[in-house]
Amino acid sequence: MDYDKLVDLIVNEVCKKLSIKEEKENNNKEKVVVLWEKDLNNFKQLKSEYNVSCYNEKIEECDILIISKLCLRGLSNMSLGISVSNEERFILSMLMQGKKVYALEEGLEYRKYKKTAPKALYNKFIDHEENIKTYGIQIIKNIEDIQLKNKPLYNNQPIGNEEVVIKDLKNTGDDYKFIDLTTKKLISESDLKKPHLNGIKIVHINKKCIVTPLANDFIRIYHLQLKRI
């Protein structure tokens, strides 16, 4: 066999195997979709942990959605829970499915007009921003915040693992106040905000209680501890 042809054959086989391996690794990663962004260079630090792609109409779902830009109309529509574009419909669909949705702070167009916009109008858009937060959209300053928010707590063990939580509780001492939420079947982020502001570090819930993803993020970020009773 010709030496050059043999080399080409070996190289092609190696490339095929590397391509298959890369494809398998990508399939095992969480899928991140970026809206209103054509250049993914700003998101390259996510590629080591996530399968990152720009939104297109063929995409039906994802694990994490990043909104890179949100114009005045888009923010208003999201606040009202309505959509006039495929992108806005995709955002609402992911929120309804309980997916993690992030919006980049620098992409919020209304903030550019802080010095020139009428105060009443500017405050209206502040209200819109607060509304979308209650729907589950998290406003972040940096892409790195996504990686921090998605890192598991307690040495890679999930929040809600009773053995891990109880073990940590033994080290906290008895001086911490706690709140009893054992009557609730579902714990949301809003259930935890007020107790956190009042200095409460420990939350008692029942064993069958469901903790929403946003509540889990809040627990991790503010170092709260769950105890399943």
Image (cartoon, rainbow, N blue to C red):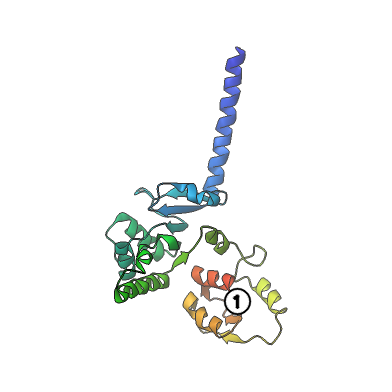
Q: Would residue 29 be visible to someone looking at this image? A: no
Q: Amino acid at mark 1?
A: Leu
Instruction: Give left or right: position of 93 versus 176.
Output: left
In x, y percent, where is residue 20?
55, 37
In x, y percent, where is residue 42?
48, 50
Mark 1, residues whose alpha carbon is within 10 Å: few (<14), some, or many (≥20)? some
Residue indicated by mark 1: 224
Say which residue appears at 55% left-offset and 81% top-offset. Answer: 196
Q: How many marks?
A: 1
Q: Quadrant of the C terminus?
A: bottom right
Say which residue appears at 44% left-offset and 55% top-offset. Answer: 62
Q: Quadrant of residue 174?
A: bottom right
User: Which sits in the foreground, 164 or 114?
Assistant: 114
In x, y percent, where is residue 35?
39, 54
Q: Quadrant of the N terminus?
A: top right
Say which residue appears at 47% left-offset and 58% top-offset. Answer: 64
